[in-house]
Amino acid sequence: MMTKQSVLLALLSILFLFSACKDETTEFFPIAPVAADTLILGGVSGTEVVTGNDEELIGAVALNSVFVDLSTSTQTTALRTKWDLGFYGGTDFRVILNHSTGATAVKLDKNNMNAVGESDSTALVGPNTLVFGNGTSNVDPMTGSFADYLSGTVVDEVSATDAENMVYMVNRGMSGVTGTVTAITARNNWRKFRVLRSARGYTVQYAAIGATTFSTVTINKNTSNNFSYLSFTGGEVTVEPVKKLWDIQWTYTSYPNAEGNPVGTTDFVRINAENGVTAAQVMVTSAITYRNFSAANLEGVTFSAERDVIGVNWRNLATAGSSVYRDRFYLIKDTEGNIYKLRFNSFTRADGGTRGRPNIDYILVQAAEI
């Protein structure tokens, strides 16, 4: 006859074997996507610097970038001023500038940080080399595909040969932060930096312009994120969520105007093309509306991987009163294959909203096949 102790041991043994088998065969199933939701994006941080206390002025320089994951109906915010450089987690060794503050940079002809000083920065003042909006060669592109973005960065791909990696001078950018600053007064916002390859990612050297020593930090490649980020004043920082956990970003950015020159642009929406998100714009007709659009209407829709396929196309910045366009909405296909329809309801006082806190809603049109 079995004792209580032997029965307990037998049960524990069975549980252990069951657990062991379960661990070896555990599968992770996708979570069912949210069917529909309405979100007010938290672009205003509460630390914006403006003259006066008008919410429209505050919202126009909203300091938060907002990342939205449609399948979980979550948003993550990060201060635009939180970072200076981003480091690609993919196969290539690429470095990006902070597009959300109008950061600019130029490559120098020196590969020694301590050989770069005040005279190098002085030479850049006259031709306005690092003044935001003075041409496209000193800013990273915001149009086109993700491949276009990587190939068009100001900073060259980081070479495996250290001597080929030059020092860069960077204006950290103040666009949409505290207003316009001149080239001369902005020089206290300039830094020098150099990036090398390391065994697991990047080695970054950075310092003030006139410094004769510099800080060094290693940024490991993180394949779970599109980019890892560095602040010249705060070290390595977290900005965007894990790449699988966001679909669109609402932010202030640098974007070409009608003449092709980069300008500070508010309320910009880009898709997570880095991780395979695509989108399409749909114009409202007598037959097709946001409300009645269904999976049956997907045939013939062409999804785009252009990062700015939504961009600024959803809103009208008019002197008499800015408002969202009511004649269009967007389809967004996430990396799992879920397809959503999304529209913008408001973003200013003129259309019943609040600047810096755009209102969106979205509905799942077609769930991914599991």
Image (tube, helix red, strand yellow):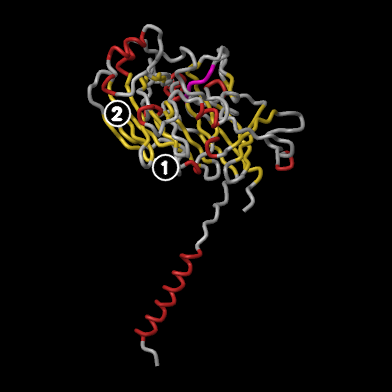
Quadrant housing residue 163: top left
Q: Residue at x 64, y 36 (%)?
A: 331
Magenta segment: 252-256
Q: Residue at x 57, y 23 (%)?
A: 312
Q: Nearer the viewer, mark 2 or mark 1?
A: 1
Give the vertical position of 273 relative to 265 (above or below).
Answer: below
Q: Which mark is residue 222?
A: 1
State the residue in front, 304 or 181.
304
Q: Is residue 66 magenta?
A: no
The answer to whether the residues at label 2 and label 1 have Cβ atoms under 8 Å apart is no
- The residue that label 2 is drawn on is 233
Quadrant housing residue 2: bottom left
**Cα distance in 3D space between marks 2 and 1:** 21 Å
Q: Is residue 255 magenta?
A: yes
Residue 359 on image: x %, y %: 54, 31
Sort mark 1 into few (<14), some (14-19) or many (20+) by Cα contacts within 10 Å.
some
Quadrant placement of the N terminus: bottom left
Q: Secondary structure at mark 2?
A: loop
State the residue in front, 229 or 221.
221
- Furthest residue toward top: 126
> What kind of residue is marked 1?
Asn
In this rendering, the count of numbered labels is: 2
- Please report whichever mark, 2 or 1, sits nearer to the chain's N-terminal start: 1
